[in-house]
Amino acid sequence: GEDVEQSLFLSVREGDSSVINCTYTDSSSTYLYWYKQEPGAGLQLLTYIFSNMDMKQDQRLTVLLNKKDKHLSLRIADTQTGDSAIYFCAEGSSGGSYIPTFGRGTSLIVHP
Amino acid sequence: ETGVTQTPRHLVMGMTNKKSLKCEQHLGHNAMYWYKQSAKKPLELMFVYSLEERVENNSVPSRFSPECPNSSHLFLHLHTLQPEDSALYLCASSPYIEGLAGEEPPYEQYFGPGTRLTVT
């Protein structure tokens, strides 16, 4: 299987919450990232969480980490049409090279 | 210009052509990367350069040839490509590829907008 797995698509209605899920295989992962790619643009770091944390909140974004199950999620509250993008989960390790490993990306489609 | 720029933004080439993709970063970073983004596949790391030296080459076919003349510029030379090479090619940069003492995460990578390549 892949090192980082995500579902390909998620469709939500404007104003609802979106939850994008990710699973990873490397138990030594130290940092877990969410990158956002808007149409016609490159990836941009949205948020990240250290592996010794369970949750991180940043305005409308909530990241939950279940290290035991190697499961990461990104919740976007009050989803807006401007949130429509591809969201990439990535994992990286500390010590030595920390080049992250990315998933396939989840396309979030927000309907008005 | 600021950030990471890539040219051209779109490229259509035949299988017998030779072309080059260019990436430039204005962030003072020491590491640069080429990624391939294909539909429904994980983002694929192709090449990594650190201080102008290639440090990683993930089994990429020889029809892709990278060049890093200095820490601000990165090229990807293309020749005799196949239709399955059609994809979005992303360039990225970061301060370093390895954690340094006293350096704080999140060790962010900065991406360019990509070159949409179509091989006919």
Image: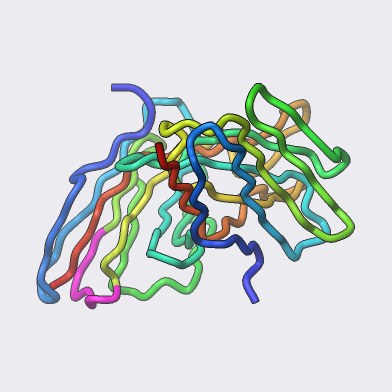
User: What stretch of residues is rendered in magenta?
Assistant: B77-84
Is residue A92 rendered to the left or right of residue A81?
A: right
Residue ID at (67%, 47%): A98
**Residue B47: x percent and y percent?**
45, 58
Q: Quadrant of the N terminus of chain B?
A: top left
Q: Nearer the viewer, residue A13 or A75?
A: A13
Marks counted in the figure total 0
Is residue B69 shown to the viewer in this render? Answer: no
**Residue A60: x percent and y percent?**
63, 26
Is residue A48 shown to the viewer in this render? Answer: yes
For residue B41: magenta? no
Is residue B12 rendered to the left or right of residue A104?
A: left
Residue ID at (30%, 42%): A40
Q: Nearer the viewer, residue A25 or A79?
A: A79
Figure colour scheme: rainbow
For residue B82: magenta? yes
Residue ID at (60%, 60%): A6
**Residue A33: x percent and y percent?**
65, 43
Kindly indicate the quadrant of the structure image that contains residue B84: bottom left
Q: Quadrant of the C terminus of chain B?
A: bottom left
Residue ID at (67%, 56%): A22
Residue A13's place in the image compared with B57, above or below, is above
**Residue B14: x percent and y percent?**
10, 71
